[in-house]
């Protein structure tokens, strides 16, 4: 019976196209690409031997030696394709370290193929695997089934391995990779039952074409501007490392002045700068950290990820990166001075899980730059990140279990020589005894949306206190309540606030709302509407943290503000001789805009005296009192007790 050649010719064409495109796309770097390319070449050779064997079989009697050579090599290479496909899967899942650890895997991978080789060699003498009958026709021998058993072992191993590590792949990749097994099984069965229909290599090459389209897509992993791997590949690879318990050493490089430089350079020059940095980093990588990966996460953040490289080598490379980025970069005749913060993280020794690691990335930008390589082990605060990982649940739990409590910090009036107001500051003591700072939970609540419930809770508590008889005895004019940016942007805010005040039957003048300088600098209609409605209703407004953001004085002057709160940074700088000019002029300017001043963060008697002399109307700070619970505030203002450390 004539064997069909067409399928193999189609396979040959597909494989030649795939090999050419792989070469043109220059996809030969890295284990994954190497195994895929090897798979293509092996398939091409196998198909070549199959075509030769079919041609010889179809030619009829004779050419016995060539027939033995063609069939033996076809079987040899063909049987190697499945183990090579498994290697490709292992490389894709980046689980070599697991394979290396467990002796059973290398044995499972190599033993069956070794048996194949022994069978094929011995077949040349004993003809039990296949032979040529009296008419020189190819005939399967009595032990040919062993070849199928070995193929079945590989199929099973590959299938189970892929299914076991399925979480390491996206659904798209996983389904493409696993589809190969049933398709190849089908092709093998067809060829086993109908030896004339040679479709195995055709189905095999069609599967490779599909994988090439669905899995081998380096473009998806690349950042187009820098030419390095992108943020999503980085996040994926880090998550892989966690799932497979792989140890990594990461060099984090954050260009902390990136935003300023980017704006200065413009789009084209910025890309030139990114490319220049990438080239410098690639050169160091190739020379000092072979087999490491380079990523650009955007916003001036570069990452070098290595595994199994000794710490000394990684440290030396980090030092080299640090020194290389210090001199000015010349971009289009402009001299650019980059401030690069370089930090080494041993993962998971320094930081234990992926989320904390990713959260730590941002921390670096806020750090004081001292020009040295930083070590995460020195600066990472475990407890802080553990809380942040779980913060949404903690906030929800606190809201439903009454773990939030409003504290009050009295504010001293210089003119009245006594306390005339207080600021409401939220505290969170969890049931398991942890104190969580508002600096942590307020930004998290803003992101999750829980800030709106928190805002209502604080205002309800404050209004309840103001409506009480206790409050009347304190002779406080009002309580200051903090509003965060996202609250100000909420269209119903003004209505909600006024409803709560009305419900408690208190005067609107008893509430002062604080908005931060950053919120004030957003020019958003919703926020302006809210502030105008609240101000018209008699609620006074304060500008909090003045001096910490980039103030747009024109905008601030246009808002209905009654008080400006000078941030603690003003009291910190007041010691420096040149700064007193800045301070005096700032105070004068605010007064000329008809606003009153509260100075925050006053910790000493000298500072309290200094700001009184500078004619600030109100003083707030630990010098007078830390924030404290309502009862302690009542006792404190009564003059009966003085609080110690209540924070
Ligand atoms: P803020 O509104 O600027 O509050 C002043 C912060 O400075 C408070 O920190 C207070 O404890 C602290 N402070 C007061 N006097 C001194 C001092 O003399 N020295 C020093 N070093 N610190 C002083 P706290 O309570 O940790 O609050 C931090 C921030 O969290 C607040 O800054 C505010 O922006 C936010 N926050 C607190 N409670 C709420 C709330 O109920 N709602 C909203 N939206 N934000 C809140
Ligand atoms: Mg405040
Ligand atoms: Mg403040």
Image (cartoon, rainbow, N blue to C red):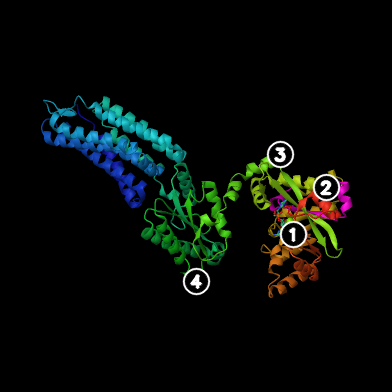
Relative to 164, is 645 above or below? below
Q: Earlier in the sequence, mark 2 or mark 3?
A: 3
* Magenta segment: 463-492
Q: Determine contact: label 3, label 4, CB under 8 Å.
A: no
Q: CA distance from mark 3 to mark 4?
A: 58 Å
Tag 4 or tag 2, which sits nearer the N-term? 4
Residue 495 visible somewhere in the drawing? no
The residue under the point 64% across, 45% down is: 448
Q: Is label 1's Cβ within 8 Å of ligand 1?
A: yes
Please tell me in which quadrant of the rendered image residue 103 appears.
top left
Distance between mark 1 and mark 3 Cα atoms: 30 Å
| Closer mark to the observer between disc 3 and disc 4 | 3
Estimate the spatial distance between the alpha carbons at disc 2 and disc 4, rounded to whole Å.
60 Å
- Precedes in sequence: disc 3 or disc 4: 4
Which numbered circle lies on residue 334?
A: 4
633 and 512: which is toward the camera: 633
Front residue of 157/3: it is 157
Residue 581: x, y in percent? 72, 74
Residue under pointer 3: 401
Category of crowding for the residue at label 3, using alpha-carbon neighbours closer than 10 angstroms: few (below 14), some (14–19), many (at least 20): few
């Amino acid at each position: 019976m004539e064997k069909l050649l067409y399928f193999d010719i189609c396979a040959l064409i597909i494989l030649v196209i795939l090999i050419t495109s792989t070469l043109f796309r220059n996809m030969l770097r890295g284990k994954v690409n190497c195994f895929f390319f090897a798979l293509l070449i092996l398939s091409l050779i196998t198909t070549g031997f199959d075509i030769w064997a079919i041609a010889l079989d179809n030619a009829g009697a004779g050419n016995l030696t060539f027939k033995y050579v063609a069939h033996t090599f076809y079987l040899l290479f063909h049987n190697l394709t499945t183990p090579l496909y498994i290697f490709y899967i292992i490389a894709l899942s980046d689980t070599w370290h697991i394979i290396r650890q467990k002796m059973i895997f290398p044995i499972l991978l190599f033993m069956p193929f070794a048996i194949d080789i022994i069978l094929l060699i011995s077949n040349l003498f004993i003809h039990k695997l296949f032979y040529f009958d009296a008419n020189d026709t190819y005939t399967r021998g009595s032990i040919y089934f062993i070849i199928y058993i070995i193929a079945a072992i590989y199929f099973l191993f590959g299938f189970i391995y892929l299914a076991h590590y399925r979480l390491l792949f996206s659904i798209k990749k996983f389904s493409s990779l696993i589809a190969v097994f049933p398709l190849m099984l089908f092709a093998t069965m067809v060829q086993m039952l109908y030896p004339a229909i040679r479709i195995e290599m055709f189905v095999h090459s069609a599967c490779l074409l599909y994988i090439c389209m669905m899995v081998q897509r380096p473009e998806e992993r690349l950042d187009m501007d820098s030419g390095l791997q992108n943020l999503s590949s980085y996040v994926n690879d880090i998550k892989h490392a966690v799932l497979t318990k792989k140890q990594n050493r990461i060099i984090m490089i954050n260009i902390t002045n990136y935003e300023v430089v980017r704006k200065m350079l413009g789009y084209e020059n910025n890309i030139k700068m990114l490319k220049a940095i990438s080239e410098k980093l690639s050169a160091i990588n190739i020379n000092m950290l072979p087999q490491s990966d380079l990523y650009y996460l955007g916003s001036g953040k570069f990452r070098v990820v290595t595994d199994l490289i000794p710490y000394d080598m990684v440290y030396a490379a980090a030092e080299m990166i640090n020194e290389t980025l210090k001199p000015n970069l010349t971009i289009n005749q402009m001299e650019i001075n980059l401030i690069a913060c370089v930090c080494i993280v041993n993962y998971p020794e320094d930081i234990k899980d992926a989320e904390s690691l990713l959260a730590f990335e941002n921390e670096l930008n806020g750090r004081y730059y001292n020009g040295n390589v930083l070590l995460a082990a020195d600066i990472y605060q475990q407890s802080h990140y553990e809380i942040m990982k779980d913060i949404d649940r903690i906030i929800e739990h606190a809201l439903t279990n009454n773990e939030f409590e409003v504290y009050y910090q009295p504010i001293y009036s210089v003119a009245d020589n006594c306390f005339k107001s207080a600021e409401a500051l939220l505290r969170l003591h969890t049931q398991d005894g942890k104190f969580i700072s508002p600096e942590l939970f307020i930004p998290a609540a803003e992101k999750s949306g829980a800030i709106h419930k928190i805002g209502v809770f604080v205002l309800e508590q404050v209004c309840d206190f103001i409506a009480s008889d206790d409050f009347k005895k304190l002779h406080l004019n009002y309580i200051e309540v903090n509003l965060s940016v996202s609250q100000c942007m909420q269209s119903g805010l003004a209505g909600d606030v006024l409803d709560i005040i009305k419900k408690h039957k208190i005067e609107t003048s008893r509430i002062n709302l604080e908005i931060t300088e950053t919120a004030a600098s957003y020019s958003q209609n919703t926020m302006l509407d809210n502030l105008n409605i609240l101000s018209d209703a008699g609620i006074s407004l304060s500008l909090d943290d003045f001096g910490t953001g980039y103030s747009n004085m024109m905008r601030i002057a246009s808002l209905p503000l009654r008080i400006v709160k000078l941030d603690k940074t003003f009291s910190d700088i007041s010691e420096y001789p040149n700064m007193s000019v800045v301070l005096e002029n700032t105070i004068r300017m605010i007064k000329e805009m008809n606003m009153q001043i509260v100075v925050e963060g006053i910790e000493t008697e000298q500072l309290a005296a200094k700001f009184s002399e500078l004619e600030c109307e109100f003083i707030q700070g630990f010098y007078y009192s830390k924030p404290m619970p309502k009862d302690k505030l009542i006792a404190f203002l009564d003059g009966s007790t003085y609080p110690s450390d209540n924070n």
